[in-house]
Amino acid sequence: MSRVRVIGRGLLFCLGAILVLCAPSSFPDEAGQRLLFGIRAQVTLDGVPIGGWLPPEVSALLRQRYRLERAMPTDARLQVGSGKVIPARRGLEIDVARTLERVVRARPGEAVSSALIPIDPAFTERDIARITRNIGDYHTWVWGSEERLHNVALAARRLDHSLVMPGELFSFNEVVGPRTAAEGYKPAPVLVGQGTAMDAGGGVCQVASTLFNAVLAARLEVVERHPHSRPVEYVPKGRDATVLYDSLDFKFRNNTDEAIIIRSHVQGRNLTIRILAPDTP
């Protein structure tokens, strides 16, 4: 029984105790090559007939399949708002060398399956479960009408359970989304210059400002922040952050080496935002 290995563009094969390197210039004609070195008759690879194929042809097929069929792993995630954990999934890729070895060794008529290598995800449900240590929090009192309180609570729910990976840029507008009646927001006072006006989503800036202060407490990198046109009642001067969808955003970067989670909720009229990091082992 011969054993064949692809070496560059040549073939290294073993006949009993004799090891032979066959260079392209010394190959017999194609029919002779397939007779000497071809895959045995009626062998299949994952259902594809490859009897008589030369090992370089099988190798080319495997490398093409490796590129097309490689399934990368997906990390575990949190569903923003609900906190539902979306499990991680392992990936798979073809082990070209092991599969080629299986094919070359296959007996006539044998059905060969590709050897697969699992690829583990980098971030799993267990990693999410470890994120319980408070590294920064802030509390503000929600003043004003019931409509304003409704808007603050709604934005806080949409912010809750946000998972921010190391190096990731967090955008308040992207996560919370547009503040419109269609999204469930009610008309409430908003600052316009030195005056006020009624607009859907009035009060959402308090959520952005509370998050801004929690981010400062956690010593994360603030990337974008805009002040109001005048001081606001719920945070000290210079510690506010106004937001306007598609215009003014609050952004920060997770400049730590580990994932963080934002927890945000309203109890009564108290808005609390906490930033959590993995617990120390």
Image (cartoon, rainbow, N blue to C red):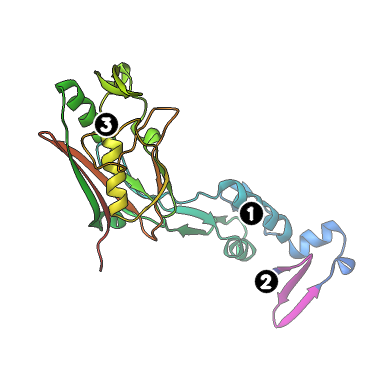
CA gap, disc 3 and disc 1: 50 Å
> Which residue is depicted at the point 36% across and 24% down?
193
Which amino acid is tagged 3? Ala
- x and y percent of residue 211 in the render? 29, 43
CA gap, disc 3 and disc 2: 66 Å
In this rendering, the label closer to the viewer, 2 or 1: 1
> Which residue is depicted at the point 25% across and 66% down?
280
Main SS of residues in magenta: strand
State which tag comes first along the sequence, 3 or 1: 1
The question of residue 12 being in magenta is answered with yes
- Furthest toward the right, the residue is 25
Q: Which residues are magenta?
A: 6-21
Between 37 and 95, which is closer to the camera in this rendering?
95
- x and y percent of residue 199 in the render? 30, 18
- x and y percent of residue 270 in the render? 14, 38
Badge 3 density bin: few <14, some 14–19, many ≥20, Cα 10 Å:
many
The answer to whether residue 113 is seen in the rendering is: no
Which amino acid is tagged 2? Arg
> Which residue is depicted at the point 21% across and 47% down?
138
Q: For the C terminus, which image quadrant?
A: bottom left
- Furthest toward the left, the residue is 268
The answer to whether the residue labelled 2 contacts the one labelled 1, judged by CB atoms less than 8 Å apart, is no
Horizontally, residue 142 falls left or right of residue 248, namely: left
Q: Which residue is mark 1?
A: 62
Q: Which residue is mark 2?
A: 3
